[in-house]
Image (tube, grey):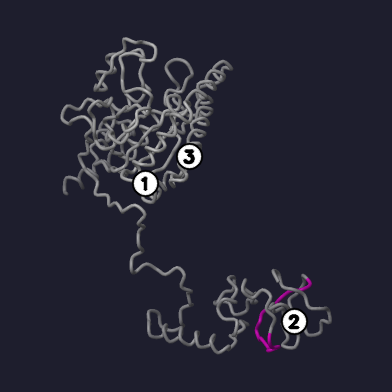
Amino acid sequence: MTTDVASRASLESLLMSRPLSDPELMQASDRAPDYAILPDVSVIKIGGQSLIDRGRAAVYPVVDELAAVKRSHQILIGTGAGTRARHLYSLAAELGLPTGVLTDVGSAVADQNAQMLGYLMARHGVPVVGGSAFGALPLYLAECGAAIFSGMPPYDMWQRVPNEGVIPPYRTDAGCYLVAEVYGCANMIYVKDEDGLYTANPKTDLSAKLIPEITVEELIAADLPDLVIERPVLELMRRARYVRSVQIINGLRPGLLRRALAGEHDHLGGLRAAAPSAPFGERHDEHPPANRTFPRGQGRALPVDAPDLARPRTRAAPGPAGDPAAAVAQRGRDRRSLDHGQGSRRGNPGRRGAACRSAGASDADPHRPWHPGPSCAGRRARSRSTHRGAGRVDLRGGGAERASHRGVARRAGCVLPVPRDDRAPARRAPGC
């Protein structure tokens, strides 16, 4: 405990006195304990060109499998962009537009795929969430066990400029991986139309061989001409703190997604970061979080001492501060006054109760005019009783006149005091 306090004090001291690029500051921040936000969730990326663009024959079986696995696993489903995004990239690049514009138009296609997948899974209660709604992900996962999001990271105009060309380097594969890493998720699974990593593109090269398992460093050193996932994912995995392994499965083969979520890694394509101390597929949490999870569909109950927001509030009783007996006695007198129809001295009709009191009236100011509340609309006064001290109202835009007890005009429950010698017809109060 003493070491943790000293470490936090040292980090705070360095943050206040050093530039943010200081090496010692970076090392101190790296020693801070990690906290996985959603450690029991798996992120599944559905390929755009590999699956969604294939249409009904490929998408419907994947939807059925996703609906089945969400009953026993919490999953976040990201969508790729696919062929339509490539067409937009070609048009925008030919027009000479920069990388940020290409990112923006590519995000629109990934959003469209997320919407279509959301409509297909709507009967299973799975929502589509945008970037601004990610704060509600725990609620969606607790209620229905799954949520769909667009895989394109929301860099837009701030996309990192690539070393060559104008194609956005961080696309849907990288976006889904970043979601899994930021939330400290258990698995990152890419659903493609291939069985895993190959030495070449198996669609065009019949001599391509499957790579059952490989580390990031080995894959970078191999410098293969074609990869089934985006190359920036490799750089992200080298610096990962949570998701240090990913799986690539063939979505055209039923049952593989269930096996991957169950922890089976045999005969499933896998890629892991260089970490010899841990087996493939195992998370590297030095500080496992103590997150409390709730059964699906079971909400949080309010604590016993939580305030009752629906209970009407009464003003504090006059008298010595902190005297509970005086406060209880005053509340009882107020309640009896309303029950017996006794009008208050501030012009509030007694029989209408607390619901007719104006929300804008101040108990501290006895000279402010009373205006009816929403529940007073349409009610007519049952008597022409006098309400003294109802306040001052300027009917002609000039000086205010004191209301007379004989000049009280009532209409539809609205009390408007008028001058005694004014023979003009009664006027309505605002909102009556």
**x and y, in percent, of residue 262 in the image:** 26, 37
Label 1: few (<14), some (14–19) or many (≥20) C-alpha neighbours in 10 Å? many
Residue kind at label 1, given as amino acid type: Gly
Q: Residue at x 48, y 87 (%)?
A: 333
Q: Is residue 198 above or below residue 15?
A: above
* Picture quadrant where residue 161 is located: top left
- Toward the viewer: 377 or 34? 377
Q: Is residue 306 left or right of residue 317?
A: left
Tell which tag, 2 or 3, sits nearer the viewer.
3
Q: Is residue 260 magenta?
A: no
Q: Is residue 358 above or below residue 340?
A: above
Q: Earlier in the sequence, mark 2 or mark 1?
A: 1
Q: Residue at x 59, y 80 (%)?
A: 366
Could you tell me how far apart the alpha carbons at marks 2 and 1 are, in whole angstroms?
A: 62 Å
- Does dot 1 land on a helix, a strand or a loop? loop
Residue kind at label 3, given as amino acid type: Leu
Q: Earlier in the sequence, mark 2 or mark 3?
A: 3
* Picture quadrant where residue 399 is located: bottom right
The answer to whether mark 3 and mark 1 are in CB contact below 8 A is: no
- Does dot 2 land on a helix, a strand or a loop? strand
Please name the residue that numbered disc 2 is placed on.
409
Start and end of the magenta stretch? 382-396
Please name the residue that numbered disc 1 is placed on.
145
Please name the residue that numbered disc 3 is placed on.
120
Label 2: few (<14), some (14–19) or many (≥20) C-alpha neighbours in 10 Å? some
Tell which tag, 3 or 1, sits nearer the viewer.
3
